[in-house]
Image (spheres, rainbow, N blue to C red):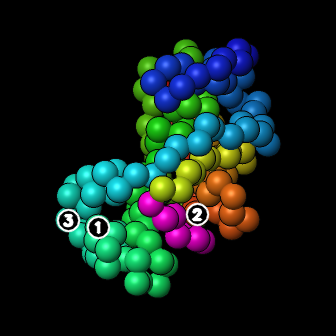
């Protein structure tokens, strides 16, 4: 097992070989660095998903809305699991890595534009599957300075030898 420091465009903080992965149920992976949610990111997500609801894309109107500011789409915040995951963890000695899905997702607090978020994760379960292993990661996307997280999800990944 190797610990590394990183930014989002370099190697993950923790890299293990496949055999080590099989013993990692319960492992706390720590938390990523903070990422600011910008209006540009929200607008790009709106364009990609065709969801231009004013609470996301109209900062002037959103000031008078229920959140007092524009907010990120819940699915935008959820999608950040992928870059955050790459910052935290990787497995060597495999031929294929697959995002297998989600078991449970809750959007527990809105993320206002300008806020910073990060992900904390724990490997909750590890199971052998044909040709590899599946892990369930309990992931929490936190909002800087707030008690309630933005997203709580169980993320599934598979690693094939």
Q: In the displayed structure, would residue 76 be above or below residue 17? A: below
Q: Nearer the viewer, residue 132 or 86?
A: 86
Earlier along the polypeptide chain: callout 3 or callout 1? 3
Q: In the displayed structure, would residue 74 be above or below residue 4? A: below
Q: In the displayed structure, would residue 60 be above or below residue 8? A: below
Q: Which residues are magenta?
A: 107-113
Residue 92 place in picture, x, y as percent:
56, 17
Q: Of discs 1 and 2, which sits in the foreground?
A: 1
SS at circle 3: loop
Q: Is residue 67 magenta?
A: no
**Most common secondary structure along the magenta stretch:** loop
Q: In the displayed structure, would residue 23 be above or below residue 62? A: above
In the picture of the structure, the residue carrying the numbered disc 1 is: 57
Counting labels gives 3
Q: Could you give the CA–CA distance between mark 3 and mark 2, rounded to whole angstroms? A: 22 Å
Q: Is residue 108 magenta?
A: yes
Mark carried by residue 153 = none
Residue 43 place in picture, x, y as percent:
27, 57
In the picture of the structure, the residue carrying the numbered disc 2 is: 150
Quarter of the image containing the N terminus? top right
Q: Nearer the viewer, residue 34 or 24?
A: 34
In the picture of the structure, the residue carrying the numbered disc 3 is: 50
Earlier along the polypeptide chain: callout 1 or callout 2? 1
SS at circle 2: loop
SS at circle 1: helix
On screen, residue 122 versus residue 101, left or right, reads: right
- For image coordinates 40% across by 84% down, the residue present is 64
Which quarter of the figure has residue 142?
Answer: bottom right
Residue 90 place in picture, x, y as percent:
57, 26
On screen, residue 105 versus residue 123, left or right, reads: left
Which quarter of the figure has residue 34?
Answer: top right
Residue 6 place in picture, x, y as percent:
58, 22
């Amino acid at each position: 097992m190797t610990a590394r420091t990183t930014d989002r465009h370099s190697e993950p903080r923790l890299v293990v070989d496949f055999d080590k992965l099989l013993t990692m149920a319960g492992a706390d992976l720590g938390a990523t660095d903070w990422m600011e949610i910008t209006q540009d990111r929200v607008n790009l997500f709106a364009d990609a998903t065709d969801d231009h609801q004013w609470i996301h894309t109209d900062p002037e109107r959103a000031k008078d809305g229920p959140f007092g500011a524009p907010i990120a789409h819940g699915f935008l915040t959820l999608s950040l699991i992928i870059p955050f995951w790459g910052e935290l963890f990787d497995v060597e000695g495999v031929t294929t890595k697959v995002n297998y899905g989600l078991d449970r997702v809750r959007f527990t607090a809105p993320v206002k534009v300008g806020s910073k978020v990060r992900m904390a994760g724990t490997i909750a379960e590890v199971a052998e599957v044909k040709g590899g292993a599946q892990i369930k990661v309990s992931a929490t996307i936190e909002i800087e300075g707030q008690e309630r997280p933005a997203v709580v999800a169980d993320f599934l990944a598979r690693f094939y030898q």
